[in-house]
């Protein structure tokens, strides 16, 4: 039986098409997925992301523990509310999950992990707490809901919908969050647009969703979320990386912080022993068709593979992420095998789209 | 659910219309287009190709997924809907007006063995 978020009944009542996603019954689209996508690029849309898990990590050793647990370095977080994107690696340097960690104080952090990996993430974290003997408490917050409001008008419409939110978030910088009563409002997202991710008590979720809809924020499903993050060049766990892949081979080297030579984070030894053997570039299909995951890419330097692909509503052509041999340059023509036919594609630097504008 | 009574159907969500010239016209049902979502690409068979019943002969791709389309009966492909190639979203707008391809069946009686609207309605309802 699939699990339901606190907004499940609202989605069903709105006539959303529901699908299983990582064991959760989630809306994939309400009407046209492409229209939902355009609404986020041009106005404001909202997503129920309550299937993701918020975790509170508190205790005297919280900072030291996270500096061991994560490949990115939380020591660079000094302003309360500041967020950091990081991979959590296993000893072999494989990606257990990618996550966002929010800093409130040296002994208090909020971590948000993916839905499909939540159980194994918590088990891994508890195992590492036991192994290191860190003086920390990890609290899984299934009592919370999360709503992502995204788009150029997302902030203004949120201010209209949530009384009192404007004064406390108007000065909020990108990738920063602020606690407002029992809500956490973060200027983060997974679409390449401005906006907020709002974490709030489950009991308030439906009223807040309805208020946002009343302020002109369009409900959007996971379908649009996927094409938006693809255009924005953002990886999806389980598709673009997993426990068998090094972050260095999936375009996430920028999130691995090796500056502090003393910091022995889990997976560091393995990463230092195995430098990147692949690079990630975007592909734009130059012929009719649709790029999908796991298609072979033929280049002058050898074969590669697509990891995510779809039709880009903004660019009106098909795009993909491809893991390619080192040495394949940007703006090179390559071929992709789609059902036995070789179609021409061009390599591009990621992302494809940012803040409503094509970058390719 | 929009399932015209005069058409024949398959379990794999194709509709089939018998034409006066002895050919059959094939498309995907309204239920199928709704499940696929926004359609962005069609790969249609070339005229002259001989197909077996149940053979994959076209692909309909939405933003979400690629879906194979099967020949409902054996025969020869006699036409593909070129206009639909340029405007695949028209299949979302009207799945019965915007056909995909036509077959000249090897044995026209094979069409009688396909599902009628009532039988297809049960399958679509269980989907």
Image (cartoon, coloured by chain):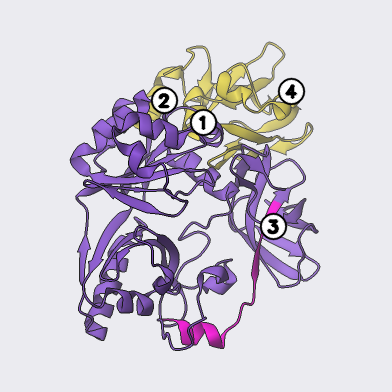
Chain colours: A purple, B yellow
What is the spatial separation of the Cα atoms under label 1 and label 4, in whole angstroms? 33 Å
Could you say whether the residue bearing mark 4 is in a helix, strand or loop? helix
Mark 4 vs mark 3: same chain? no
| Residue to which mark 2 is pinned | A216
**Rendered location of residue A143, percent (x, y):** 19, 50
Q: Mark 2 and 4 residues: CB-CB less than 8 Å, in contact? A: no
Question: How far apart, in angstroms, are the residues tagged by discs 1 and 3?
Answer: 26 Å
**Going by the image, does A290 lie left or right of A266?**
right
Please provide percent x and percent y for residue A177.
36, 52
What numbered label is drawn on residue A349? 3
Using the rendered image, report if marks 1 and 4 lie on a common chain.
Answer: no
Q: Secondary structure at mark 2?
A: loop
Mark before the other along the chain sequence, 3 or 2:
2
Give the CA separation, mark 2 to mark 4: 37 Å
Q: Chain of mark 1?
A: A
Look at the image and say whether residue A275 sits in the magenta stretch: yes
Chain identity of mark 4: B
Tell me which segment is drawn in magenta: A266-283
């Amino acid at each position: 039986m699939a699990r339901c978020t606190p907004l499940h009944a609202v989605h069903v009542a709105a006539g959303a098409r529901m699908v299983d996603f990582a064991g959760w019954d989630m809306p994939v689209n309400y009407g046209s997925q492409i229209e939902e996508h355009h609404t986020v690029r041009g106005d404001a849309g909202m997503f129920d992301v309550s299937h993701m898990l918020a975790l509170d990590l508190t205790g005297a050793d919280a900072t030291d523990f996270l500096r061991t647990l994560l490949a990115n370095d939380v020591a660079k977080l000094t302003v309360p509310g500041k967020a950091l994107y990081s991979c959590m690696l296993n000893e072999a340097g494989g990606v257990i999950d990618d996550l966002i960690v929010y800093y409130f104080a040296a002994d208090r952090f909020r971590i948000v992990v993916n839905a499909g990996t939540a159980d194994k993430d918590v088990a891994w974290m508890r195992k590492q707490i036991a192994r290191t003997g860190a003086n920390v408490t990890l609290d899984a917050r299934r009592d919370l809901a999360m709503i992502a409001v995204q788009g150029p008008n997302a902030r203004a419409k949120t201010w209209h919908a949530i009384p009192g939110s404007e004064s406390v978030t108007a000065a909020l910088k990108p990738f920063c969050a602020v606690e407002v009563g029992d809500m956490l409002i973060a200027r983060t997202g997974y679409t390449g647009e401005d906006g907020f991710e709002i974490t709030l008590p489950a009991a308030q979720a439906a009223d807040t969703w309805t208020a946002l809809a009343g302020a002109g924020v369009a409900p959007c499903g996971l379908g649009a979320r996927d094409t938006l993050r693809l255009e924005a060049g953002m990886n999806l766990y389980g598709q673009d990386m997993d426990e068998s892949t090094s972050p260095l081979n999936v375009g996430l080297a920028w999130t691995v912080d090796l500056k502090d030579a003393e910091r022995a984070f889990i997976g560091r030894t393995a990463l230092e022993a195995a430098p990147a053997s692949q690079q990630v570039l975007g592909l734009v299909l130059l012929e009719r068709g649709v790029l999908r995951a796991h298609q072979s890419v033929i280049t002058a330097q050898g074969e590669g593979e697509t990891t995510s692909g779809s039709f880009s509503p903004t660019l009106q052509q098909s795009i993909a992420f491809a893991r390619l041999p080192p040495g394949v340059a940007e703006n090179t023509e390559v071929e992709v095998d789609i059902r036995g036919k070789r179609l021409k594609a061009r390599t591009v630097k990621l992302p494809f789209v940012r803040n409503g504008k094509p970058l390719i | 659910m929009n399932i015209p009574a005069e058409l024949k159907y398959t379990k794999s969500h194709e509709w089939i219309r018998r034409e006066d010239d002895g050919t059959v016209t094939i498309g995907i049902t309204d239920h199928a287009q709704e499940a696929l979502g926004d359609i962005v690409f069609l790969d249609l068979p070339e005229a002259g190709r001989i197909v077996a019943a149940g053979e994959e002969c076209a692909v309909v791709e939405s933003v979400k997924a690629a879906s194979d389309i099967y020949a409902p009966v054996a025969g020869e492909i006699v036409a593909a809907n070129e206009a639909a190639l340029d405007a695949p979203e028209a299949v979302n707008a009207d799945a019965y007006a915007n056909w995909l391809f036509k077959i000249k069946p090897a044995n026209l009686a094979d069409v009688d063995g396909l599902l009628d609207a009532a039988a297809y309605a049960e399958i679509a309802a269980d989907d």
